Amino acid sequence: MTIQASAGELIQIQFPVFDIDGITPITGLVDGDFSKVLIVDDTESAQTMTILEVGSTGRYVMEFTPNVDGLWYAEVATMIEDVFADQVQVGPPPTDWLDAIWSVILPGSYPAGSAGARVSNIDTNTEGLYHALIMGVYSATGGAVDGVETDATKADGFYDGLTVVVRSADGNVSRRVASYVESNGTFYFDDDLPFIPAPGDEVIVLGILGKVLCENSDSMLEKLLEIWQRLGLDPDNPLCITKTYQEANGWRLVHTTIGDTMLVTREDT
């Protein structure tokens, strides 16, 4: 098994020590009773590894703190020549899968910092699929902690039960809409905001798939056809999702094909 960690993170790996019969735990051992090896990539590391017993159980923990990125190998040998070892992959989490998934939602690369930095752009995308994520984007004109006034003009109750994200200089928060009223385009929330919305703050309404898709469809038949297509039930608009796997050297690559887009994720086996 390969453990995933970051530089500077304390690594703790547990292991048992048994007597020569392989059954009786050996208790009371101290750090100096073990032979230890710590390697990063192809070089022996100068980092300190210590061994501690868990109570008086005959079960021990090897501890060390990697200081650089790389593949770390930790090995401990006992006086009866039992050897315990494990690997730790140290470094930032892989971003290839994140970039691939994000590119399906929005063009461009995944933004540094926070996904919220790009949420406001979703409604500008011309593909209907992306509109399914957003019901509307409005500008705050005022409000209080229990609600926000906007330039929205929908009828009373149109957004009831949906989720709103308010993006302010004081933070980005989401709240469930307890009620929406046409007067001043006001969204009232189940729970108070941690700040009072200011004019110009961005108010993003997250939509329900069927409602968003059908908002601009005139007839019931058009609404049903649109949902049918988006669910992949129309032969001319299939939603094809397949998965294939490749495994080697303790890793598994999962190839997920969605339409004409392939996502590749890496898993540790």
Image (cartoon, rainbow, N blue to C red):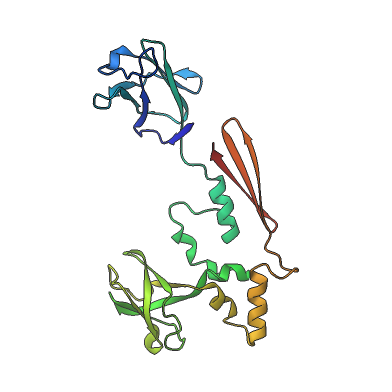
Considering only vertical position in the picture, is 24 above or below 111?
above
> Which x, y percent locates residue 211?
54, 78
Q: Residue at x 59, y 51 (%)?
A: 100
**Res. 106 visible in picture:** no
**Res. 177 visible in picture:** yes
Of all residues, the one furthest to the right in this rendering is 236
Q: Which residue is drawn at 56% across and 45% down?
A: 96
Locate the C terminus and report the quarter of the image it occupies.
top right
- Residue 201 placement: quadrant: bottom left
- Count numbered badges in the picture: 0
- Residue 77 placement: quadrant: top left
Front-lying residue, 139 or 39: 39
- 255 left or right of 82 in image: right
> Which x, y percent locates residue 1?
49, 31
Q: Residue at x 36, y 33 (%)?
A: 8
Considering only vertical position in the picture, is 66 above or below 199?
above
> Which x, y percent locates residue 125?
59, 68
- 229 left or right of 173 in image: right
> Which x, y percent locates residue 106?
57, 61
Considering only vertical position in the picture, is 20 above or below 111?
above
Front-lying residue, 210 or 41: 210
